[in-house]
Amino acid sequence: MALEPAILTVAPNGARRTTGDHAALPVIPATLAETALACRDAGAAMIHLHVRDSGQRHSLDPGLYRQAIEAIREAVGDDLIVQATSEAAGIYQAPAQLAAMRALAPEAVSVGLREFVPDDTDRDAVADFAAFLAFAEENRMLVQHILYDATDVARFIRLRASGHIPAGRAHALFVLGRYSQGQQSAPADLAPFLAAMQTAPDHANWLWAVCAFGAQEAACAARALELSGHARVGFENNLLLADGSMAPDNASLVAQAAAAASALDRPLANAATARQMMRNG
């Protein structure tokens, strides 16, 4: 059976790195727009967007998001899905995170499950998260759930079964190696996620992707693409090319993932196709 087109996402900056880590790391609307265009041309269908304040610090300010999104849209139109992060990054608490995303109502949003529901016996946390997801569904926001280990996957499955996460196609990002020594990921890190996912009755229909830390990012992405998954790459988690040299820019990391897809005879999804896939295929 032919595999679905591969969705490549670029995560060009993250919450913590600055231009001091790499001169090509984008932190203002203009450089985010330039990066978006280059990564679109390299094969990305989505950009995972963090915005920064004037000191390059992580921010969830809807106003800063709107400035960045406007610049990206001027550069690429609708040719990239723009996914806002709701990440706490040690700065925000769940109520402020959810309030910021409600105010912004972006086209797409990523939500770290353990930031909002670290324990699914916490009824208040579950109710607050479920209310946000209902708001997102009403506003046709594309929600991706970030999962850090097999325990997160199991909690995600339980919340879907209980109806607190809306029915429909599961959309998850598996973060490989977040808790490994030195935050260095390896393709083998994917196995526990897939084993946990396969306990879900609808696991064959999940839309899942990986992101990875360090020099094996490209190998992790290639393994996911081989196994019918999708991939997120970029300076958020990795600055190195597969050969260990410093990547010149985010687009070079997207190009590596695109080459891996090509080697598997797997076509790349453009933004329009990716939107359709995220809305239940």
Image (cartoon, helix red, strand yellow):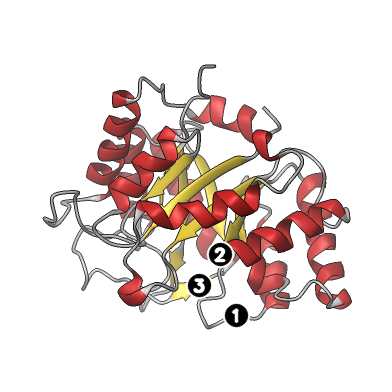
User: Is 1 or 74 nearer to us in this picture?
Assistant: 1
Quarter of the figure with the C terminus: top right
Amino acid beneath label 3: Ser
Left or right: where does residue 239 sit relative to residue 208?
Answer: left
Distance between the alpha carbons at the discs numbered 1 and 2: 22 Å
Q: Position of residue 85 (x, y in %)?
A: 55, 60
- The nearer-to-camera label among 1 and 2 is 2
Q: Which mark is residue 149?
A: 2
Write down the residue under mark 3. Answer: 59
* Residue at the image position 27 percent from the left and 31 percent from the top: 259
Q: Amino acid at mark 1?
A: Tyr
The mark closer to the camera, 2 or 3, is 2
Real-space Cα distance between discs 1 and 3?
9 Å
* Helix, strand or loop status at disc 2: loop
Task: Give the image quarter of residue 206.
Answer: top right
1 or 2: tag closer to the N-terminus: 1
| One can see residue 27 in this view | yes
Give residue 260's quadrant in the image: top left
Question: Residue 211, image x and y in percent?
Answer: 43, 54
Q: Pointer 1: residues within 10 angstroms few (<14), some, or many (20+)?
A: some
Which image quadrant is residue 278 in?
top right
Residue 106 seen anywhere in this rendered image of the structure = no
Going from N to C along the chain, the mark reached first, 1 or 3, is 3
Q: Residue at x 36, y 35 (%)?
A: 40
The residue that label 1 is drawn on is 92
Q: Could you tell me how far apart the alpha carbons at marks 2 and 3 are, in whole angstroms?
A: 26 Å
For the N terminus, the quadrant is top right
> Which label sits in the foreground, 1 or 3?
1
SS of the residue at dot 3? Answer: strand
Position of residue 251 in the picture relative to residue 197 (left or right)? left
Q: Earlier in the sequence, mark 2 or mark 3?
A: 3
Residue type highlighted by circle 2: Asp
